[in-house]
Image (cartoon, helix red, strand yellow):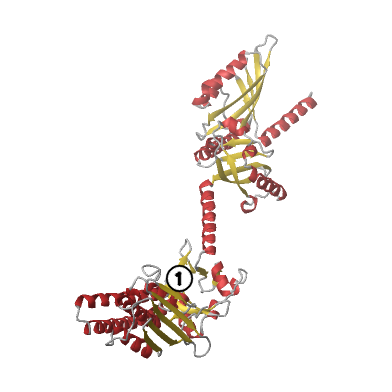
């Protein structure tokens, strides 16, 4: 008997030790006699009761339960007693009398019953699960905060398990795809990826599998830019960023990701590339020489026209030094001006001579402007060169032409003055004098017209004779012209035009053209080589009998003074009875442009 008692005491000691180590509060309640109970020291500690606490009643236990749990827990306990169940479990809050703190208690108990099913004893274990409950509550609160924050985020977010199935998507995710929550969880997003971007997704996933899973954020982020088809048929560019997630034990359990809608940025990027390409094509094919330099003034880009001008290949631009092509006389001033503009970040304009690929110095006019980055950093210069060599030469030629024109105007006025003097001095009839004066001015004008068309370089003798004598108009059947192509200098053209006009006027008044059957033949010929001569023959036939004039008129004076004296020529006039014969001989030297056949 004593041995059995000692074994029982040993077993109870072992059970007490287990309870103490595990923190289990043991309780035994005699349900037959007023709920008499035995409570272990751990039970008293869990419930905040003193070690000397007396036997407690059912009401004492109920009073210790948190008011919000009291009715539920008591009803559950009493229902368990009233039933035939042998197990009882509960979880509730108590308010400990010792310190007034609220603690969570979990109860697991066995109800012994008699043969009639009446409860006679309850043996139970109480556990303080406050820390687990608080952790569970904190987890729920954390998850709730996560969901609240995630659903408030303006960008799609998702959480996946290790197998890739989504366990959570936020509201922005469902709105992006225009699906409800359950549909969004089941969505096969890969089927929505643009075909051109599918390969990029495949490479990203392969890379993610190759890279060891790391908890270090800089190393475990995976990002890819793709186009996704929304339910409404709209393609959107997104940047998807994901990283692995781990449980409390550090085990990799899945991924969490976000998607940024970068459509606007992508469209801007595409438009920027298109704009840059348009700018590049425009610059490359522009009919002016366009260049760009860095902040030090070194060329970083030359368009095709400028590369051809300097004979530089596209690959050779970085090594090319434009200043080496400057004319020695221009180099110092140009380099100084460009350097000042670079330092001041200001515009500049200049003109200088540069050696081109053909070994010629060409005058280029340059205008340049500073260029800056979006952050305001000075990047260098952009400018255009225009070859103004011909323009400058034309300007010089124009100045010479103006001087020449002034000279010719003065000469013309002198001729007009001489014509007026000769016409009105010896002609008593004012009407006749006016007609003669007008006719001589018209002849002078015809010569000037021909010279103007040829830029006052030369005039064709054939055209001059045809125009002055109206050989294809009124006198088409009465005056014939024959001779090789001869180009006259301006001075010769004016003088010969005046001479032909006077000969024609005299023929109409007194010679062959005064009669219907009269005719005039104008022939000319020339000799080539050194001392070349132009010979012009005026022959009248079919007119009245010709006799020498009684006095010298303007025509004779013109022939002798202008042709013979001013042009260093010879003029002979024969007054044959059959018709006037005039021979004109003029020297044709190298100053005569374009002698032809």
Q: Nearer the viewer, residue 136 or 436?
A: 436
- Residue 43: x and y in percent read 61, 30
Q: Quadrant of the N terminus?
A: top right
Q: Is residue 151 visible?
A: yes
Q: Specify whether 261 is left or right of 479.
A: right
Question: Does dot 1 land on a helix, a strand or a loop?
Answer: strand
Depicted 481 relative to depicted 552: above or below? above
For the image, the number of numbered tags is 1
Q: Is residue 392 visible?
A: no
Q: Specify whether 331 is left or right of 452.
A: right
Q: Nearer the viewer, residue 196 or 558?
A: 558
- Residue 562: x and y in percent read 35, 87
- Residue 428: x and y in percent read 19, 81
Q: Nearer the viewer, residue 231 or 20?
A: 231
Depicted 534 relative to depicted 1: above or below? below
What residue is disc 1 on?
Answer: 368
- Residue 323: x and y in percent read 53, 79
Depicted 42 relative to depicted 549: above or below? above
Using a 10 Å C-alpha cutoff, classify the residue at mark 1 as few (fewer than 14 neighbours), some (14 to 19) or many (20 or more).
many
């Amino acid at each position: 008997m004593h041995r059995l008692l000692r074994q029982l005491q040993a077993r109870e000691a072992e059970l007490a030790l287990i309870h103490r180590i595990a923190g289990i509060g043991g309780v035994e309640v005699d349900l037959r006699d007023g709920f008499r109970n035995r409570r272990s020291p751990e039970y008293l500690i869990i419930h905040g009761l003193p070690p000397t606490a007396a036997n407690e009643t059912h009401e004492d236990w109920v009073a210790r339960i948190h008011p919000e749990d009291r009715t539920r827990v008591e009803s559950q306990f009493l229902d368990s007693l009233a039933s035939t169940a042998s197990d009882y479990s509960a979880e509730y809050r108590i308010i400990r009398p010792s310190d007034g703190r609220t603690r969570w208690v979990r109860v697991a108990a066995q109800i012994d019953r008699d043969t009639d099913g009446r409860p006679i004893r309850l043996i139970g274990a109480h556990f303080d699960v406050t820390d687990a409950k608080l952790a569970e509550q904190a987890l729920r609160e954390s998850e709730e905060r996560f969901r609240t924050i995630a659903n408030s985020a303006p960008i799609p977010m998702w959480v996946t398990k290790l197998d890739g199935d989504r366990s959570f998507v936020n509201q922005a995710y469902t709105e992006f795809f225009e699906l409800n929550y359950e549909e969004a969880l089941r969505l096969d997003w890969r089927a929505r990826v643009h075909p051109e971007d599918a390969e990029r997704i495949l490479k990203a996933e392969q890379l993610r599998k190759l890279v060891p899973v790391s908890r270090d954020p800089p190393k475990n982020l995976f990002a890819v830019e793709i186009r996704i088809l929304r339910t409404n048929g709209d393609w959107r560019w997104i940047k998807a960023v994901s990283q692995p997630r781990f449980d409390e034990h550090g085990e990799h359990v899945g991924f969490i990701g976000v998607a940024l809608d970068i459509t606007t940025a992508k469209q801007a990027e595409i438009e920027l590339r298109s704009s840059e390409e348009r700018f590049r094509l425009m610059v490359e094919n522009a009919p002016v020489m366009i260049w760009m330099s860095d902040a030090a003034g070194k060329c970083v880009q030359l368009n095709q026209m400028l590369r051809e001008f300097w004979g530089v290949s596209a690959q050779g631009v970085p090594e090319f030094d434009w200043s080496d092509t400057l004319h020695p006389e221009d180099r110092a001033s140009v380099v100084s001006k460009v350097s000042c503009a670079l330092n001041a970040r200001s515009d500049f304009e200049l003109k200088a001579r540069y050696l081109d690929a053909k070994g010629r110095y060409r005058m280029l006019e340059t205008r340049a402007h500073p260029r800056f980055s979006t952050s305001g950093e000075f990047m260098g210069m952009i400018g255009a060169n225009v070859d103004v060599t011909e323009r400058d030469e034309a300007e010089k030629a124009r100045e010479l032409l103006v001087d020449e024109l002034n000279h010719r105007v003065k000469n013309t006025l002198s001729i007009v003055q001489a014509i007026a003097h000769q016409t009105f001095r010896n002609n008593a009839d004012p009407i006749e004098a006016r007609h003669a004066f007008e006719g001589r001015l018209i002849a002078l004008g015809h010569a000037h017209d021909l010279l103007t068309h040829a830029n006052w370089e030369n005039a064709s003798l054939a055209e001059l004779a045809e125009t002055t004598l109206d050989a294809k108009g009124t006198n088409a059947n009465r005056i014939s012209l024959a001779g090789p192509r001869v180009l006259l200098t301006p001075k010769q053209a004016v003088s010969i035009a005046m001479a032909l006009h006077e000969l024609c006027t005299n023929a109409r008044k007194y010679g062959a053209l005064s009669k219907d059957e009269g005719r005039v033949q104008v022939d000319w010929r020339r000799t080539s080589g050194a001392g070349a001569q132009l010979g012009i023959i005026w022959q009248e036939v079919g007119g009245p009998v010709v006799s020498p004039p009684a006095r010298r008129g303007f025509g004779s004076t013109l022939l002798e003074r202008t042709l013979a004296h001013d042009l260093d020529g010879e003029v002979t006039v024969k007054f044959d009875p059959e018709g006037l014969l005039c021979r004109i001989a003029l020297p044709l030297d190298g100053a005569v442009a374009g002698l032809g056949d």
